[in-house]
Image (spheres, rainbow, N blue to C red):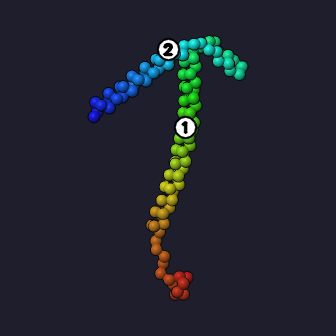
Amino acid sequence: MKMLKRLLALAVFLAAVWAAIEFRDRNLDPMVVHLLVWQTPPIAVWVVVVVAFLAGALGASLLLLLRVTRSNLTARRYRKAANKLESEVHQLRNLPLAAEPGPGGDGSV
């Protein structure tokens, strides 16, 4: 079973390499990218596509990092609050029981 998984992973890897080489070979035409105030020299189409893909992946990763960081900080705050409440419950459990009622019957002396 392990060997089959390795062969399948190798086949997927080789297919991805073949697809990348085919993509590069079919998109060698030069193009100029016009940005707002700047324009690139002629670059192959495949380079533009790969750079755009990497820029999108980087942007998405940064957004994900912000979300994960925010979530971790929120979880940390909740853990601290839970620990504080648990220590308060522990302190309340260790309080001595109320004294026996006094002569008035209502606990006053």
Residue 39 in the image: x percent, y percent?
A: 67, 16
Q: Residues within 10 Å of mark 2 (few under 14, many from 20)?
A: few
Q: Which residue is mark 2?
A: 25
Q: Quadrant of the N terminus?
A: top left
Residue 88 in the image: x percent, y percent?
A: 50, 61
Picture quarter containing residue 15? top left
Look at the picture and state if 67 lies above or below 12: below
Q: Secondary structure at mark 2?
A: helix
Residue that appears at 56% across and 22% down: 49
Closest to the observer, 40 or 61: 40
Q: Is residue 34 left or right of residue 68?
A: right
What is the residue that sits farthest to the right in this orientation? Answer: 37
**Disc marking residue 64:** 1
Residue 23 in the image: x percent, y percent?
A: 50, 19
Picture quarter containing residue 65? top right
Residue that appears at 45% across and 67% down: 93
Q: Is residue 70 left or right of residue 18?
A: right
Residue type at mark 2 is Asp
Residue type at mark 1 is Leu
| Mark in front: 1 vs 2 | 2
Q: Residues within 10 Å of mark 1 (few under 14, many from 20)?
A: few
Q: How many marks?
A: 2
